[in-house]
């Protein structure tokens, strides 16, 4: 505001200075000639210079005032209209604000009504259309939301927003084909957001379109839209899922090639290694399968890998099999699964002392699982310690179950995943590197901890004579076993 007053003040000061300089002594004289040239008589008018300056200034100010009045009257209708428009705009913004707040608080119906009112007041189709679509989506009115998002496709400015909304609604409602179509349309632009690849990949996974999902991962890798390790893990799971599907279709050769690609992408994925080893063995490449499982055990031991490894030598003698198992243990000797595998081998050799020695640290350093309790019970049975064997057997009933062990199907191969299981596994293992355990989640039947005819299988119903001879100890405090374990360890040293 002050800057607009600077020039008038300067002019006013200049006028005052001029009047002071002129004073009252200076006069201006005007000579008026008659209309007839032959008459040379003059009528003279005299006026002070100061009065002349003031008169001229007054005239200029009057002209400016009249011009300002005319201009104000000229723009008055527009100002009146603008005032009403500003009031209308304020009402529109209030409605827009209420729509957004209602949408966030879950009041979808009110949000949609306010969004429509904002659209009528603001005349901003892009903004109000987006808010209306969001409100309809929050209200569960998918048809109206689709209509609003579809309207946004008509403008280049809002096309990406419309595609995103349509893809999201399609994916959330299970229409994965439409979600793929919308995501592919958005993905054609090099400036498309990460959401397009995300919806495209997840929709393809949901439809088990493994080849399309691999292409999407390749595109994500080129654009650096995803973490490199996550892409590697997802590729491995997708290839393993594809190999499993090909195997079920009887296409063993293609399944074998695909499984090899899977383990070449990410070597630590146990299901892919187990599948590839089984297909290699069927293809007459048992040595390569053994080498593959040894590498997998060195990186990420899993009980299914140990069983797959033993199956490779099922036609060999027990001595040869024991030698191979020891070689497998040496690849990762300090891992928990290696200690358990050593205990299982000792039980097969009827060496209860060695079995308890291998299990000793696990039984004392962690809460024993049902699997560990069962192995300890078998070891005690071999040693003839019926009291402690029954204690471990009773404890196994209430002990926690190992999720990895539940992956083993007693009537089929390990990791006997369905298509929906593979779909979940792509996301869970790809993002976090964690296996899912559908058999564990569904409380399905589990494989026996140790299958061998050489180990006496425990019968929970002991004979009446034996029950009279022994007293059942407290399964939570096997003190005698702890002492014996310590003695056994000391003697071994």
Image (cartoon, helix red, strand yellow):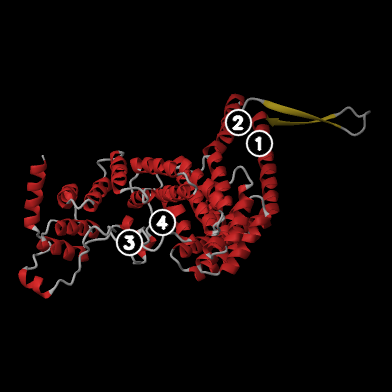
Left or right side of 20 for 363: left
Q: Residues within 10 Å of mark 4 (few under 14, many from 20)?
A: many
> What whole-number distance in Å separates the C-alpha atoms at marks 2 and 1?
9 Å
User: Secondary structure under badge 3?
Assistant: loop
The image quarter containing residue 27 is: top right
Q: How many marks?
A: 4
Marker disc for residue 447: 3
Q: Is residue 22 above or below residue 81?
A: above
**Which residue matches tag 2?**
15
Between 25 and 478, the residue placed more toward the observer is 478
Between 421 and 153, the residue placed more toward the observer is 421
Q: In this orientation, does residue 455 appear?
A: yes
Left or right side of 39 for 451: left
Instruction: Mark 4 and mark 2 in contact? Answer it, CB < 8 Å.
Output: no
The image quarter containing residue 65 is: top right
**Which residue matches tag 4?**
415
Q: In the rendered structure, which disc, 1 or 4, sits on the residue that comes first in sequence?
A: 1
Q: Is residue 357 above or below residue 245?
A: above
Between 422 and 302, the residue placed more toward the observer is 302
């Amino acid at each position: 505001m002050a800057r607009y007053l600077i020039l008038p003040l300067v002019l006013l000061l200049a006028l005052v200075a001029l009047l002071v300089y002129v004073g009252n002594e200076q006069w201006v004289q005007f000579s008026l000639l008659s209309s007839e040239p032959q008459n040379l008589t003059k009528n003279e008018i005299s006026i002070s210079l100061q009065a002349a300056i003031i008169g001229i200034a007054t005239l200029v100010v009057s002209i400016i005032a009249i011009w300002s009045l005319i201009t104000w009257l000229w723009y008055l209708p527009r100002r009146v209209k603008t005032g009403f428009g500003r009031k209308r705009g304020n009402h529109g913004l209030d409605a827009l604000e209420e729509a957004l707040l209602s949408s966030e608080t879950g009041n979808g119906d009110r949000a949609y009504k306010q969004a429509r009112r904002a659209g009528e007041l603001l005349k901003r189709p892009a903004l109000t259309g987006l808010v209306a679509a969001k409100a309809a989506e929050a209200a569960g009115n998918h048809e109206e939301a689709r209509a609003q998002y579809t309207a946004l496709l008509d403008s280049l400015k809002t096309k990406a927003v419309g595609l995103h909304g349509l893809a999201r609604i399609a994916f959330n409602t299970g229409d994965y084909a439409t979600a793929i179509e919308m995501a592919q349309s958005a993905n054609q632009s090099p400036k498309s957001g990460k959401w397009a690849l995300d919806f495209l990949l997840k929709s393809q996974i949901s439809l088990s379109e493994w080849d399309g999902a691999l292409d999407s991962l390749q595109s994500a890798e080129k654009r650096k839209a995803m973490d490199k390790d996550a892409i590697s893990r997802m590729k491995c799971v997708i290839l393993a899922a594809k190999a499993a599907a090909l195997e079920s279709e009887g296409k063993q050769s293609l399944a074998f090639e695909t499984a090899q690609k899977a383990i070449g992408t990410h070597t630590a994925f146990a299901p892919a290694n187990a599948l590839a080893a089984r297909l290699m063995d069927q293809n007459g490449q048992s040595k390569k399968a053994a080498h593959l499982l040894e590498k997998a055990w060195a990186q990420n031991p899993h009980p299914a890998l140990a069983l797959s490894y033993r199956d490779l030598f099922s036609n060999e003698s027990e001595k040869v099999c024991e030698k191979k198992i020891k070689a497998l243990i040496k690849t990762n000797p300090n891992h928990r699964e290696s200690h358990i595998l050593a205990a299982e081998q000792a039980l097969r050799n009827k060496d209860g002392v060695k079995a308890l020695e291998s299990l000793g640290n696990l039984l004392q350093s962690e809460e024993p699982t049902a699997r560990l309790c069962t192995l300890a019970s078998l070891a005690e049975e071999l040693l003839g310690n019926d009291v402690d064997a029954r204690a471990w057997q009773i404890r196994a009933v209430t002990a926690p179950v190992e999720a990895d062990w539940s992956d083993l199907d007693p009537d089929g191969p390990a990791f006997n995943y369905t298509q929906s299981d593979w779909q979940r596994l792509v996301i869970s293992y790809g993002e976090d590197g964690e296996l899912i355990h559908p058999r564990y989640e569904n409380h399905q039947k589990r494989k026996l901890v140790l299958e061998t005819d050489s180990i006496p299988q425990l019968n929970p119903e002991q004979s009446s004579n034996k029950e009279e001879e022994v007293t059942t100890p407290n399964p939570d405090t096997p003190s005698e076993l702890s002492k014996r374990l310590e003695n056994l360890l000391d003697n071994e040293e």
